[in-house]
Image (spheres, helix red, strand yellow):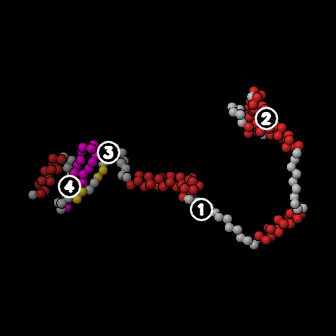
Amino acid sequence: MKQHNTERLSALADGELKGLSRWLAQRHVRHCPQCAAELQRVERVRQTLAACPPIIEMSDSADFFWSKVKRDITTREPQTVFIPVPRLSLADWLLVHRGALATATSGLMVALLTGVMLQQPHSAGPGTVLVERVDTVIPNTVATPLKGAESDVAVIWVSGLEWTADLDEMKQRFENSET
């Protein structure tokens, strides 16, 4: 014991301490005269109380006492007793159901992330082209930019013209189609 603890001394005198706690308390009492004197006082009080047990007297006989108790119970039987039930606040409810709330939140997050992932366009790998359609003011033509793996390359094909891989030839065909 690091401090002079009278409750611990009472527990030692009553036999409530076991094992290491008992051994440490006894060791402290052997080396501390103040606690040894207190332990002797506690033991003397215990002996005095044991020598003079309290005398319990009832004003009525046991049978008469129990008949009064039984009569009180029967007179109160038809009475209805309302016991108020405390209402849970939102914080109390959340504390009680925190496991279910965490599970529901996790499920909702997984569902939202799955929905977002399904809406995003996915590339199939290298060489994949993202195609966007743009309507033009020229009748019967559509400009379609093709964006490839290289960000600075874009090819525009105008429908209604014959396709050619040469960009200069494409420009020339486009200029000739306007006239």
The answer to which of marks 4 and 1 sits earlier in the sequence is: 1
Q: Secondary structure at mark 1?
A: loop
Q: Which residue is mark 4?
A: 158
User: Mark 4 is on which residue type?
Assistant: Val
Disc 2 crowd, CA 10 A, few/some/many (<14, 14-19, 20+): some
Which region is colored magenta?
140-158
Disc 1 crowd, CA 10 A, few/some/many (<14, 14-19, 20+): few
User: Mark 3 is on which residue type?
Assistant: Gly
The answer to which of marks 1 and 3 sits earlier in the sequence is: 1
* Residue 176 visible to an observer of this rendering: yes
Q: Secondary structure at mark 2?
A: helix
Query: Cα distance, mark 2 to mark 4?
Result: 106 Å
Res 34 → quadrant: top right
Residue at left 79%, top 71%? 75
- 126 to the left or right of 156: right
The answer to which of marks 4 and 3 sits earlier in the sequence is: 3
Q: Which residue is mark 3?
A: 127
Query: Cα distance, mark 1 to mark 3?
Result: 64 Å
Residue 87 — which label? 1
Total numbered circles: 4
Q: Which residue is mark 2?
A: 39
Asked if the residues shown at circle 4 and circle 3 are in contact, with their CB atoms under 8 angstroms apart, the answer is no
Query: Cα distance, mark 4 to mark 3?
Result: 22 Å
The picture places residue 68, in percent across and down from the top left corner, at 84, 66
User: Mark 2 is on which residue type?
Assistant: Leu
Residue at left 44%, top 54%? 112
- 117 to the left or right of 66: left
The answer to which of marks 3 and 2 sits earlier in the sequence is: 2
The answer to which of marks 1 and 2 sits earlier in the sequence is: 2
User: Mark 1 is on which residue type?
Assistant: Arg
Disc 4 crowd, CA 10 A, few/some/many (<14, 14-19, 20+): some
